[in-house]
Amino acid sequence: MSAKNKLQRFADNEVFPNVIQPNFEEIFRKDYTLKNNWRASYWKNDLPIVLELGCGKGEYTVALAQKFPNKNYIGIDIKGARFWRGAKTALEAGMNNVAFLRTRIEFIDSFFGKDEVDEIWITFPDPQLREKRAKKRLTSPRFLNMYLGMLKPNAVVNLKTDSKELFDYTKSLLEYNQQEILIATDNLYNSPYCDEVLSVKTHYESYYLTQGKPITYLQFRISKTIEDFPEEED
């Protein structure tokens, strides 16, 4: 993408009514104004709220919103030039149940309060494979405990990834914490679970499939504070 196109997308995002771009000062160590008020102040309805974390171009956010107009969808990513595509598509289609939030996932608990979120999708995140970066994984205890603080009871989290390492790590962490795993498959497209929702393909997923990489999928619930694996003794 050229610098000119990127600048144009940034300018578009500033005026798109479905894009929210808080300043750092509005969220650092404080609650954003919409926290606990998304339904009343932004959506102005009582429909379920579904998040896609690390939404990239917003393909999953838009596709799910089209399939389920009775739910509100928020795609979250720090790279606004990417999700510009999803925001523009939603506007051109006249979709009023889609929004995009530009922020780092590290700050997500500044945006959503207790029982405010009905479902979370994590689609093809950076697996952060180096051991020293494990705490940056979007399914590490740090992040899962953030999600726990905003998800309704019995809400589900979906992880779709090409990384077998991230799949195995997340599954093992959930098992270690005795959490409920609803679906676990290390080859989604060779499983009985691939319905019209799970068959939605992002830009990155399509690329991974051309490389012959199997797509993994986990669906699970978080019911208590997640503890990390015990450190190994030397």
Image (cartoon, grey):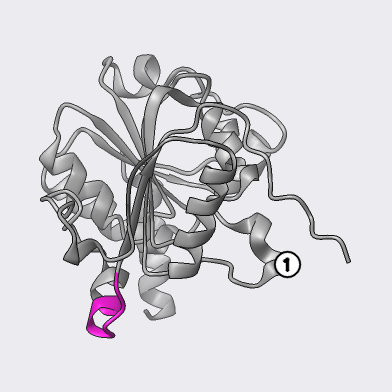
Count of numbered circles on the image? 1
**Residue 141 percent location from the top left of the image:** 63, 44
Left or right: residue 29 versus residue 99 is: right
- Left or right of 9: which side holds 102? right
- Residue located beneath label 1 in the image: 132
Q: Which of 76 and 186 is in front in this view?
A: 186
- Residue 13 visible in the displayed image: yes
> Residue drawn at (46%, 19%), measured in percent from left and top?
115
The kind of secondary structure element at disc 1 is helix
Q: Which residue is drawn at 39% across and 76% down?
A: 4
Kind of residue at disc 1: Lys
Query: Whole-percent x and y of residue 61?
Result: 27, 47
Q: Nearer the viewer, residue 107 or 100?
A: 107
Specify the segment rendered in magenta. Answer: 207-214
8 vs 35: above or below:
below
Res 90 seen here: no
Q: In this view, does 97 lie above or below 1?
A: above
Residue occupying the point 60% across, 35% down: 145
138 left or right, relative to 230: left
In the depicted structure, whether residue 111 falls above or below residue 216: above
Furthest residue in direction bottom, as rendered: 211
Crowding near the residue tagged with mark 1, few <14, some 14–19, many ≥20 C-alpha atoms within 10 Å = few
Residue 2 horizontal/vertical position (percent): 39, 81
Residue sitting at x 23%, y 83%: 210
Residue 16 magenta: no
Q: Tell which of 119 and 178 is nearer to you.
A: 178
Note whether 22 is above or below 199 in the view shown. above
Q: In this view, does 28 lie to the left or right of 162?
A: right
Residue 34: % across, % down: 48, 24
Please state which of residues 29 and 15 is positioned toward the viewer in this rendering.
29
In which image quadrant can residue 164 be found?
A: bottom left
